[in-house]
């Protein structure tokens, strides 16, 4: 489960329920839920699951 996601410079840090870093990625944080994180990279929006796997991508 994702507890929070934070933008730090050009990186996005995603934290689990134990406040440990679940994964990091580059881009602009657009939002998160308990199970997904949305990150904008260029003209694409990437949706990641709680393990850092890409669930979907969208053009924007």
Image: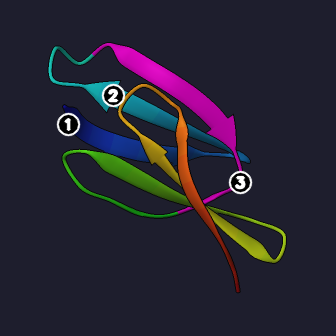
Residue at the (16%, 14%) spot, across then down: 18
Whichever of labels 1 and 3 marks the residue nearer the N terminus, that label is 1
Q: Which residue is labeled 2 in the image?
A: 15
Residue at the (42%, 52%) spot, across then down: 37
Q: Which residue is labeled 1 in the image?
A: 3
Q: Secondary structure at mark 1?
A: strand
**Outermost residue, bottom side:** 60
Q: Which residue is labeled 3 in the image?
A: 27
Q: Are marks 2 and 1 in contact (CB under 8 Å)?
A: yes
Q: Residues within 10 Å of mark 3 (few under 14, many from 20)?
A: some
Q: Is residue 25 magenta?
A: yes
Residue at the (34%, 50%) spot, across then down: 36
- What is the chief secondary structure element of the magenta stretch? strand
- In space, the residues marked 1 and 3 are separated at their CA atoms by 19 Å
Q: Residues within 10 Å of mark 2 (few under 14, many from 20)?
A: some
- In space, the residues marked 3 and 2 are separated at their CA atoms by 16 Å
Q: Which residues are magenta?
A: 20-29
Task: Answer with the quarter of the image where residue 50 lies.
Answer: top left
Quadrant that contains the C terminus: bottom right
Residue 15 lies, in percent from the top left, at 33, 28
Whichever of labels 2 and 1 marks the residue nearer the N terminus, that label is 1
Q: Secondary structure at mark 2?
A: strand
Residue 8 lies, in percent from the top left, at 59, 42
């Amino acid at each position: 489960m994702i507890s929070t996601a934070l933008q730090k410079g050009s990186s996005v840090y995603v934290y689990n329920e134990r406040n440990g870093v679940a994964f990091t990625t580059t881009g602009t944080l657009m939002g998160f839920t308990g199970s997904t994180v949305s990150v904008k990279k260029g003209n694409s929006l990437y949706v990641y699951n709680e393990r850092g796997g890409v669930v979907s991508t969208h053009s924007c």
